[in-house]
Image (spheres, rainbow, N blue to C red):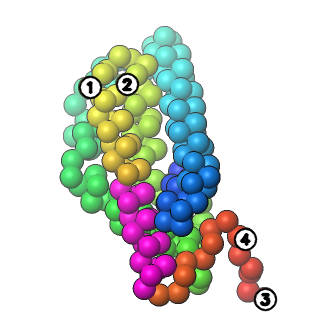
Amino acid sequence: MVVSPDFLPVAAIATGFTFGRRRLALGGLRPLLVGFAGAVALVAVLALVAHAVGALPTEEVTRNRPLTDFIWQPTLWSLVVALPAGAAGSFALSAPSATTLVGVFIAITTVPAAGILAIALALGSGTQAAGSLVQLGTDIAGMLIAAVVVLTLQRHLSHPPRDLLRPRRWAR
């Protein structure tokens, strides 16, 4: 299973919540918030530079883009996509026999939403910035809810989930 880099802090938050480990949950929250805030700030600065040199006209950001509008216009489907992504990712991280690989291309719409948020903030498109922020929150909330449900089910219905903090022993 390939999980996005932003899922690891979500998994830490879910594990902390599920097992009553407040420090772990807060420890996952910090890199999630700082990581997204830093990435948005960096991309916003780059967008301002690109705009200043004429490489990113405002019309490119504000025009209608029917194939990618879902990134900043969240619907119920945003949550429908985030829930199975969170469930699969948490199962892949917690099941004893599953393995994971961190990869950026499996990021549902968290990374694109953060990118649109940054560009919209830089170019003053409040509507797209607000929609992207809602999309980003919906994705993270959906992944978090699903991860808590999977960990809780594993904890109570079958074998206990593997401690995500302990390194795996590789098969010999």
Q: Quadrant of residue 118?
A: top left
Kind of residue at badge 3? Arg
Q: Residue at x 53, y 87 (%)?
A: 159
Q: How far apart are marks 1 and 3 (CA)?
A: 54 Å
Q: Contact (CB < 8 A) between labels 2 and 1?
A: yes
Whether 107 is drawn above or below 38: the answer is below
Q: Contact (CB < 8 A) between labels 1 and 4?
A: no
Say which mark, if any, is on residue 167: 4
First of labels 1, 3 by sequence position = 1
User: Is 33 placed left or right of 27 in the picture?
Assistant: left
First of labels 4, 3 by sequence position = 4
Kind of residue at badge 4? Pro
Foreground: 67 or 85?
Answer: 85
Q: Is mark 3 on a helix, strand or loop?
A: loop
Q: What element carries label 2?
A: helix
Say which mark, if any, is on residue 127: 1
Q: Which residue is at the far top?
A: 52
Q: Contact (CB < 8 A) between labels 2 and 4?
A: no
Q: Where is residue 81 in the image (x, y as percent from the top left)?
A: 31, 59
Kind of residue at badge 2? Ala
First of labels 2, 4 by sequence position = 2
First of labels 2, 1 by sequence position = 2
Whether 99 is drawn above or below 97: the answer is above
Q: What element carries label 4?
A: loop
* Camera-nearest label, 4 or 3: 4
User: Is 152 placed left or right of 93 in the picture?
Assistant: left
Magenta segment? 142-157
Q: Which residue is drawn at 45% across and 15% down?
A: 51
Say which mark, if any, is on residue 172: 3
Say which mark, if any, is on residue 120: 2
Q: Examine the rendering and report whether any part of residue 103 can be seen.
A: no
Q: Quadrant of residue 85?
A: bottom left
